[in-house]
């Protein structure tokens, strides 16, 4: 829509005169089209929390079971993974991730036990434990696929790097 330069009335597109004051509307000179810059191909998206490329395939295939055990058996699985595959960086990575989850689960359980007389803290702890259980399942599936991804939410925690 254009605007009358005399009275400020809004005019429909293509109007030659203002329908209020009768002022002749000059047609705006068409502006030359500006060239469109060429589109650059998008850079591949790299997940900074995926460390699969940091490990050798031989290490992954030999120690996948110990990495799975770290997620399945909680604290005992972490200890078994660290003792059974002490030279495996892949098993150590997953043992540390499983330990992060186990520490978070332990802290949620302690908070719920200490503040059991409230209703909100135990309810929130149950929700948090459910989320951590889902993270444990996702991490287990990641190990089954031969990946080394840090689980969501706990990847921001700086302990056990």
Image (cartoon, helix red, strand yellow):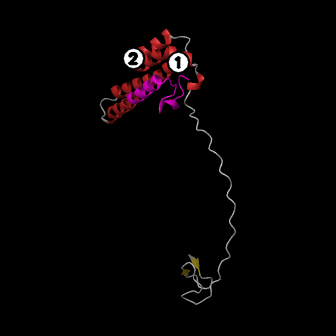
Where does the image place residue 57, in percent across and percent down from the top left?
56, 19
- Callout 2: SS: loop
Where does the image place residue 7, in percent across and percent down from the top left?
59, 85
Left or right: where does residue 119 sit relative to residue 138?
left
Query: Real-space Cα distance between discs 1 and 2?
Result: 19 Å
In the image, 117 versus 154, the foreground residue is 154
Identify the mark nearer the N-term, 1 or 2: 1
Which circle, 1 or 2, is nearer the viewer? 1
Where does the image place residue 138, in percent across and percent down from the top left?
43, 29
- Callout 1: SS: helix
Residue 22 location, quadrant = bottom right
Residue for point 40% across, 25% down: 105
Magenta span includes 155: yes
Residue for point 34% across, 29% down: 115
Where does the image place residue 107, in percent across and percent down from the top left?
41, 25
Part of the protein shown in magenta: 133-161
Residue for point 69% across, 63% down: 34
In the displayed structure, would residue 135 be above or below residue 91?
below
The residue identified by callout 2 is: 73
The residue identified by callout 1 is: 60
In the image, 136 versus 26, the foreground residue is 26
Magenta span includes 154: yes
């Amino acid at each position: 829509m254009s605007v009358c330069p005399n009275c400020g009335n809004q005019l429909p597109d293509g109007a030659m005169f203002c329908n209020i004051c009768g002022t002749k509307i000059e047609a705006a000179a068409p502006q030359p089209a500006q060239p469109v810059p060429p589109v650059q191909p998008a850079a591949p998206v790299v997940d900074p929390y995926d460390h699969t490329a940091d490990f050798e395939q031989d290490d992954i295939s030999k120690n996948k079971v110990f990495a799975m055990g770290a997620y399945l058996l909680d604290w005992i699985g972490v200890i078994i993974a660290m003792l059974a595959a002490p030279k495996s960086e892949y098993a150590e990575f997953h043992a540390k991730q499983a330990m992060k989850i186990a520490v978070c689960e332990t802290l949620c359980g302690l908070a719920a036990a200490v503040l059991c007389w409230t209703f909100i803290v135990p309810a929130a702890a149950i929700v948090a434990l459910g989320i951590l259980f889902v993270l444990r399942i996702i991490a287990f599936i990641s190990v089954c696929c031969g990946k080394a991804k840090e689980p969501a939410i706990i990847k921001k925690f700086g302990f056990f790097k």
